[in-house]
Image: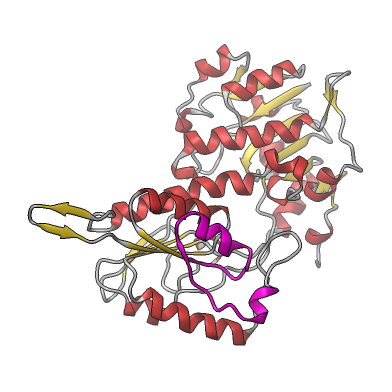
Amino acid sequence: MLIAIPAETDPAECRVAATPETVKKFAGLGAEVKVQAGAGLKSGIPDQDYALAGATIGPGALATVKDADIVLRVRRPGAADMAGAKPGAAVVAIMDPYGHIDALSSLAAAGVCAFAMELMPRITRAQTMDVLSSQANIAGYRAVIDAAAEYGRVIPMMMTAAGMIPPAKIFIMGVGVAGLQAIATARKLGAIVTATDVRPATKEQVVSLGAKFVAVEDEEFQQAETAAGYAKEMSAGYKEKQAALTASHIAAQDIVVATALIPGRPAPVLVTAAMVESMRPGAVIVDLAVERGGNCELTKPGETVVSKNGVKIVGHLNVAGRLPATASALYAKNLLAFVETLIDSKTKSLAIKWDDELVKATLLTKEGGLVHRNFQAGA
């Protein structure tokens, strides 16, 4: 059984799908591991470290993937990237399937079984496979660090001989994994932290981290969470009330970190141009939802822009990838935990259990077609 780790083809992607630690674990499962030369360099992992862990170094992408039973990547590959892989090979990555039916169809035509790690169900046995959480955790931390770097003042209160410097006020919008880590990081830096979310269960989490919860807590708010723990789409009436509360609050903030996402839908606009105009010069907005359209109306993907009134709006792409060594270490462990369920421990071979709930939830392509009900043509 051959597990291939090709280098990422996107020049902006610095993460890698395996570490020397996971290579050793795969070898213990009876697999031969082949890593493309240079695949880990942007994550601080030289080829020598992979070789010492037992991997073979492939000279190029095609040579690495050739005859592979399992291909592990960070981002969705193109069909050409899979040339040489065995028919029916398992390709596991963050597939970004929403709105990319043509790309998935092309991958299906390559004859591989594509698995989307971000579709992993949020159940107890899959916690170690939850890439959304592992990468969002890194992104939430990095967002606050980026904000602090852009902010022209110190974050904590300081008592000096020349006088007192007040602490920065940081507002976190969206209290998922990224938001919770952003709150924790902002608190550690000494900021006065407030946070908002439409899910009532998050209030206790916010308060437990030492922040203040800000939301319109009406009857609709009490029902604003899906069974899977995600935020529901709110009514126009609720959005109007929440926007009014948010607008008055944002005007007094130094830093805003926006993290709100709804799976499969464009990111909700939470910070309007008018709200940006109400903020003081030098304030900073970091938009973690930029790849889904952004939570801020003025965000530009991949850019840091300055509004007319001097507010910096940070729209970095792939924020978790801005800390590639840590993000890769966590992502590689997520992959390892999932791939272990695809391997027969006795025969040391790929043995996908098609009726496994993890497989059903994440499998996109099989035998040349799209098999996931949410991503078939016309879905």
Give the percent coordinates (x, y) of residue 194. 43, 65
**Relative to 187, does residue 92 appear above or below in the rendering?**
above
Q: Looking at this view, name the residue that lies furthest to the left.
A: 162
- Relative depth, front residue between 124 and 347: 124
Quadrant of image for the N terminus:
top right
- Relative depth, front residue between 315 and 70: 315
Q: Is residue 81 left or right of residue 10?
A: right
Give the percent coordinates (x, y) of residue 290. 50, 62
> What is the quadrant of residue 344 in the picture?
top right
> What is the quadrant of residue 164 in the picture?
bottom left
* Region in magenta: 195-223
Q: Is residue 200 left or right of residue 319?
A: right
Quadrant of image for the C terminus:
bottom right
Give the percent coordinates (x, y) of residue 101. 73, 59
Q: Is residue 39 left or right of residue 146?
A: right
Q: Is residue 15 visible?
A: no
Query: Is-magenta flag for residue 212?
Result: yes
Residue at screen point 33% across, 74% down: 252
**Relative to 86, does residue 179 appear above or below in the rendering?**
below
Query: Is-magenta flag for residue 13?
Result: no
Residue at screen point 76% across, 48% down: 123
Give the percent coordinates (x, y) of residue 259. 51, 61
Q: Looking at this view, name the residue that lies furthest to the right.
A: 355
The scheme the figure's colours follow is secondary structure
> What is the quadrant of residue 253 in the picture?
bottom left
Q: Is residue 358 visible?
A: yes
